[in-house]
Image (cartoon, helix red, strand yellow):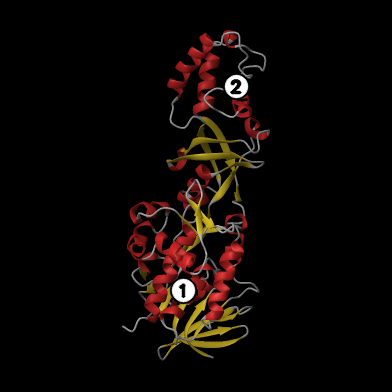
Amino acid sequence: MKYDIIIIGGGAAGFFAAINAAELDPNAKILILERGKEVLTKVRISGGGRCNVTHAEFTPSELIKKYPRGEKELRGPFHSFMTGDTIAWFEERGIELKIEEDGRMFPVSDSSETIIDCFLSETQRLGIEILKNHSVQNITSENEQWLINTNNGDFSAEKLLVATGSNPKIWKLLEGLGHQMETAVPSLFTFNIKDERIKELPGVATFASVKIPEINMEDEGPLLITHWGLSGPAILKLSAWGARELNELSYKFEIQVNWLANQNSEEILEQLLELKLKHAKQQLTKYAQFDLPKRLWKSLVLASGISETDIWADINKKQLVTLSEQLTKSEFSVDGKSTFKEEFVTAGGIKLNEVNFKTFESKLQKNLYFAGEVLNIDAITGGFNFQNAWTGGYLAAKAMTSLD
């Protein structure tokens, strides 16, 4: 079966590339090969089933800062196709996006099916063929044609786009074509912590800064206490930026949490001494201070050797020093990680110096293109991984259909 363009991988990047290529060259015969029985599975579960399409960041130099791997390489591509273009692309197809408080963008329908339906109706309208249950066994090049052998038949095309994410089998085949792969390690995960101070606090959320002294990394943001430990943007950002280092530590390390983000223990001690004078007869555990959630405040007070019934007047300086340290540098031992919702993202993929980021074409193999997470590019949570998929898919589509 002969095609002009074959796309391996029926996910976000693959579909976006196929649709844009078909629009740019209506005569192109395009095929999407998907190994699973369903396409767009990650799109379906993204954002808790709402599909976090992109993020309301409209400056390329700011947008690239969200990518622990790929920051430098995406600068140029984002000048060609980024957030505003994504919004316009979906709007042209009748899908309006909305911006949430934290900048994440979702379809107004709050359903990922809106995005899936759009992609499926566009592929149908443009005559793009989709074959599911086609697992690629081999990729070879012969007489300027790519030959693709699958478990359900063989296909050939002049141009080939690989958009398979972290599929070990495909990575092996790409290595056979001369590409070097950065091994895949998890990114975007939560920290497993067993600790009396947070054991009874699942669901408590606050703003905090978190430090991992061993790898000299620190970040701040909303922090969520869960049944298994700590989650929320502050943790997820650290898991993305520290993906490789934390993998090397086998996910066993110490963290320091400053529940008051920008204040240090000396400043807090002064404020605690003032509170001691001001609220002498008040029980410490009764009223939370520093805008902390009440249950968290109480837990940190008890962890400082202060009893539930103690009043401010009875607290000595040593106890206040301990409390100021609990508030600003609580130490926790992390032992393992958990996947963040169903959004499993990996760091790893094709080494970026082997790709031309003007076209997303391989520098080693002519007419071989890449888009999405098969590249060693990944982002923090918030719609940024999808934006990388749209940008790469669009620029690869443009390159594959140009007459140069």
Identify the residue position indicated by label 1 in the image. 17
Relative image position of residue 191 (x, y in whole percent)? 58, 44
Q: Residue at x 35, y 81 (%)?
A: 402
Q: Are marks 2 and 1 in contact (CB under 8 Å)?
A: no
Within the image, what quadrant is residue 395 found in?
A: bottom left
Q: Secondary structure at mark 1?
A: helix
Q: Residues within 10 Å of mark 1 (few under 14, many from 20)?
A: many
**Where is residue 294 drawn, in percent x and y?**
61, 26
Is residue 353 in sight in this rendering?
Answer: yes
Image disc number at residue 305: none
Instruction: Give the image location of residue 276, x and y in percent.
Output: 53, 11
Question: Height in image: 334 above or below 291?
Answer: below
Residue at image position (56%, 50%) is 189
Badge 2 element: helix
Q: Which residue is mark 2?
A: 301
Residue 111 percent location from the top left of the image: 61, 60
Mark 2 vs mark 1, CA separation in Å: 55 Å
Q: Mark 2 or mark 1, which is nearer to you?
A: 1
Name the residue nearer the viewer: 228 or 283.
283
Figure disc tally: 2
Which residue occupies 53% across, 73% down? 170
Q: Nearer the viewer, residue 78 or 380?
A: 78
**Side of 102 relative to 359 (left or right):** right
